[in-house]
């Protein structure tokens, strides 16, 4: 039904041709010439339509092998049609055609091409292993159908010859070829899998079936002497050509003709067996009903077919046995492949693909088992949480391939530093977990030191040296925790503390716990420090190194907490920056310093320049410039009395730093670089910025008397400052020898404990009063 629904035009054309042909034969049965002429025209149209359909199919198919079948079929139909035209020509002219004529030659050639086309199709349709099975099926069907045709029709021709040997041979040849074609086409239909394949062989099977019926009736009528052109069997012949053309046009209109047809398999070839058995039953019934007195073709066919059935079954058993062996081997192979695949999947699920270390899942499993063993043995266990310092820098500057190589090399170094029984896993990213079972804290410390020392040599990435170090956090079972998740969490917290304490170190959670708790307390208290009036400013005077007169001071922040006591800026400033509390605290410092300058002015003291440290986070505050202007205007102080100290790290973005400092400079304040020589600045950068003063870092001052190279660096900085017309100040002067050396280098200003520690505003007042009196 699906074939009819999709090909209504084709079906209608075939049925119309057949009906119209018979209507014409009946309508003009008494007018012979009109009857045969009209029938000739109708048949000619059917022939041309079939040739056209097959031509379209051949043209559309691109696959050479598949195209060959349709070319053979097309040529066969063309030859058959040519023979029919020649034969019709003689009939229309009422001329007895010569025998043998060209018509017979074309007919025979067409039949041969039909057989070649189907045999070629069989070769494409069946694999070599199934071909013998197919040949046996065809042989059985052919033998049985030919036996029936021989017994009732063809034997008459053979035993009652017309006297013309070639004509008698053709009368037997046509049905024999028809039965061969029908058997092959029918078997191809029964062995087809796809709907498209079945549709094609449906048209071909019906076509060859109708051709077989027409030729057998023709032979019978010839034997009886009753055949003449215009007989009711004539439309059948050309209708069979239409059916062959319909097979091609169906393929052309229903999908890409270049797509290969599905090859038959044994499961779909089984219906062929039933056809053979069905015909065998017909032979048996025929033998019983007719009671042949002589050895008939039917009986011979019964014997041969029975033998072929046995042979077929033997062959089938051998095939099944071979298939069973092959299947068993294939199953073994697939089982092995599946086992290997499962092993790979299991490894992928449990191991890191880059480093081949246990992944997070397997590490959790190992840790859980290790805790159980330690609990049973009453022993200790350590969990190390290790993070690679500067890993992001390697990824960003050298690429992810270099980052991957760093992880591989790092994992190899980790293996070399731990015990053989210790377990190393990759937690993810640049984080590793190390499980140390049955171990004391002293030995954990030794292993942690070996891990850190193992990273001292440079890593080779893209033929360049790259240095990294580990930050390690350690938790102990059962001292810190007894559950695996808690142990991992505490080790992670200890690792972050190691990061905050400068990286490249290790921290035990038990010792880090107090530090973390103190940090949390400081962070909480810092939120209320301004409100609770806990912050204050100290001022460290800056002196002219030649006259010892005070020329300025640096405002330094101090914090006294009611419970925690004095908290060092070294401790709370990083926390303030981390929490961004440095912005409101920095505003408080600047406001308080300006207020103090105003107070000194109000009391008649000669004010000095006050330097205030500005954090890099404050410099990112878009309201800073407005705030500085507002504070200066509010307290009515000279902008030149304010000096804003910035660090060299702010200069990494030159364009941004240049714009921002120019805006600040327009307010009239001074700009100095704090801790000069320790950061990122270069001479070309400094030269483009509105800098007033360079502050030589205390580390240079500390080492200048014991390290000749440091002394040369200090001398270079001083000379550079003079040449570029920068003011200079040396920080951290603690000894007379340092002050003497700086005087010799012509460094004009200095500050440090040699002259004065940071002191209160009241104490500064005393210095200002003394300075005023001397003047």
Image: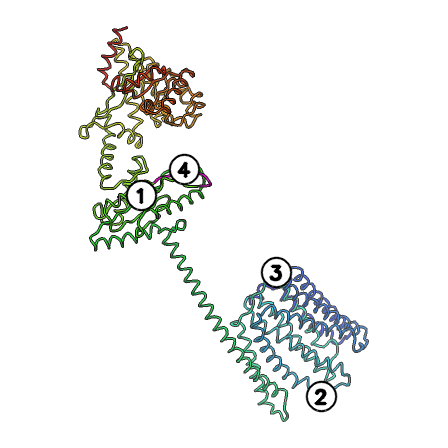
Which contiguous range is marked in magenta? Answer: 461-469
Q: Distance between the residues labelled 3 and 1?
A: 70 Å
Q: Distance between the residues labelled 4 and 2?
A: 103 Å
Q: Residue 566 or 265: which is nearer the viewer?
A: 566
The numbered mark at residue 159 is 2
- Disc 1: which residue: 450
Relative side of 322 to 104, left or right:
left
* Mark 2 neighbour density, 10 Å: few (under 14) some (14–19) many (20 or more): few
- Disc 4: which residue: 393
Residue found 25% across the figure and 17% down from its top: 756
Q: Are marks 2 and 1 in contact (CB under 8 Å)?
A: no
First of labels 3, 1 by sequence position = 3
Which quadrant of the figure contains the N terminus?
Answer: bottom right
The numbered mark at residue 258 is 3
Question: Mark 2 or mark 3: which is in front?
Answer: 3
Residue 468: image quadrant is top left
Secondary structure at numbered mark 4: helix
* Mark 4 neighbour density, 10 Å: few (under 14) some (14–19) many (20 or more): few
Relative side of 529 to 462, left or right:
left
Using the image, determine if residue 463 lies above or below residue 200. Answer: above
Secondary structure at numbered mark 1: helix
- Residue 208 on image: x %, y %: 65, 73
Q: Distance between the residues labelled 2 and 3?
A: 49 Å
First of labels 2, 3 by sequence position = 2
Residue 94: image quadrant is bottom right
Q: How far apart are marks 2 and 1 (CA)?
A: 110 Å
Q: Are marks 3 and 1 in contact (CB under 8 Å)?
A: no
Which quadrant of the figure contains the C terminus?
Answer: top left
**Which residue occupies the extreme left position in the image?**
563
- Residue 566 on image: x %, y %: 21, 27
């Amino acid at each position: 039904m699906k074939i009819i629904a999709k090909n209504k035009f084709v079906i209608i054309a075939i049925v119309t041709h057949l009906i119209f042909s018979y209507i014409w034969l009946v309508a003009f049965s008494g007018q012979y010439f009109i009857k045969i002429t009209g029938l000739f025209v109708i048949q000619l149209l059917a022939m041309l339509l079939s040739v056209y359909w097959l031509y379209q199919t051949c043209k559309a198919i691109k696959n050479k092998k598949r195209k060959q079948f349709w070319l053979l079929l097309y040529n066969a139909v063309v030859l058959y049609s040519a023979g029919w035209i020649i034969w019709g020509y003689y009939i229309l002219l009422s001329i007895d055609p010569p025998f043998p004529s060209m018509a017979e030659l074309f007919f025979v050639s067409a039949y041969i091409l039909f057989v070649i086309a189907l045999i070629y199709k069989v070769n494409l349709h069946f694999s070599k292993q199934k071909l013998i099975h197919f040949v046996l099926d065809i042989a059985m069907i052919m033998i049985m159908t030919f036996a029936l045709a021989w017994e009732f029709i063809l034997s008459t021709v053979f035993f009652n010859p017309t006297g013309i040997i070639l004509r008698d041979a053709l009368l037997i040849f046509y049905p024999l070829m028809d039965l061969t074609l029908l058997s092959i086409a029918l078997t191809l239909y029964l062995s087809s899998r796809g709907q498209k394949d079945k549709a094609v062989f449906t048209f071909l099977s019906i076509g060859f079936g109708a051709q077989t019926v027409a030729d057998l009736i023709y032979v019978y009528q010839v034997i009886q002497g009753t055949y003449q052109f215009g007989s009711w069997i004539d439309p059948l012949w050309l209708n069979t050509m239409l059916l062959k053309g319909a097979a091609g046009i169906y393929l052309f209109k229903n999908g890409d003709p270049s797509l290969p047809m599905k090859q038959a398999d044994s499961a779909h070839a089984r219906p062929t067996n039933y056809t053979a058995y069905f015909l065998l039953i017909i032979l048996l019934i025929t033998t019983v009903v007719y009671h042949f007195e002589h050895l008939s073709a039917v009986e011979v066919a019964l014997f041969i077919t029975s033998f072929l059935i046995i042979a077929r079954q033997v062959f089938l058993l051998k095939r099944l046995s071979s298939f069973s062996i092959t299947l068993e081997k294939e199953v073994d192979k697939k089982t092995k492949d599946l086992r290997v695949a499962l092993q790979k999947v299991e490894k992928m699920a449990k191991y890191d693909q880059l480093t081949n270390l246990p992944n997070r899942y397997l590490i959790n499993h190992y840790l859980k088992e290790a805790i159980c063993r330690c609990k049973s043995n009453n022993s200790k266990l350590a969990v190390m949480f290790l993070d690679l310092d500067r890993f992001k820098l390697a990824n960003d500057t050298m690429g992810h391939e270099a980052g991957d190589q760093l992880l591989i090399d790092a994992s190899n170094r980790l293996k070399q530093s731990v015990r053989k029984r210790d377990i190393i896993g990759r937690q993810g990213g640049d984080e590793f977990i190390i499980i140390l079972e049955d171990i004391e804290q002293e030995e954990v410390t030794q292993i942690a030191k070996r891990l850190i020392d193992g990273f001292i040599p440079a890593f080779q990435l893209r033929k360049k040296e790259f240095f990294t170090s580990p930050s390690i956090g350690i938790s102990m079972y059962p001292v810190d925790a007894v559950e695996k998740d808690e142990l991992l969490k505490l080790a992670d917290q200890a690792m972050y503390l190691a990061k905050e304490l400068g990286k490249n170190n290790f921290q035990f959670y038990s010792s880090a716990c107090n530090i973390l708790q103190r940090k949390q307390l400081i962070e909480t208290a810092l939120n209320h420090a301004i409100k609770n009036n806990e912050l204050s400013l100290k001022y460290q005077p800056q002196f002219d190194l030649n006259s010892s007169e005070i020329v300025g001071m640096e405002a330094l922040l101090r914090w006294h907490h009611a419970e925690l006591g004095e908290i060092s800026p070294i401790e709370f400033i990083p926390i303030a920056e981390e929490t961004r509390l440095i912005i409101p605290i920095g505003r408080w410092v600047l406001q308080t310093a300006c207020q103090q300058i105003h107070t000194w002015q109000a009391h008649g003291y000669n004010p000095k320049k006050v330097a205030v440290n500005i954090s890099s986070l404050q410099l990112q505050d878009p309201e800073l410039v407005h705030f500085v202007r507002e504070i200066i205007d509010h307290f009515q102080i000279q902008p030149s009395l304010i000096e804003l100290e910035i660090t060299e790290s702010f200069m990494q973005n030159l364009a941004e730093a240049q714009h921002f400092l120019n805006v600040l400079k327009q307010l009239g304040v001074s700009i100095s670089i704090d801790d000069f020589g320790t950061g990122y600045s270069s001479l070309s950068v400094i030269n483009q910025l509105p800098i007033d003063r360079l502050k030589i870092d205390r580390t240079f001052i500390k080492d200048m008397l014991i390290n000749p190279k440091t002394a040369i660096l200090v001398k270079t900085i001083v000379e550079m400052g003079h040449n570029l017309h920068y003011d200079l100040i040396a920080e951290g002067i603690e000894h007379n020898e340092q002050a003497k050396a700086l005087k010799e280098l012509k460094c004009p200003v200095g500050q440090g404990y040699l002259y004065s520690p940071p002191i209160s505003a009241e104490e500064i007042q005393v210095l200002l009063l003394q300075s005023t009196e001397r003047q």
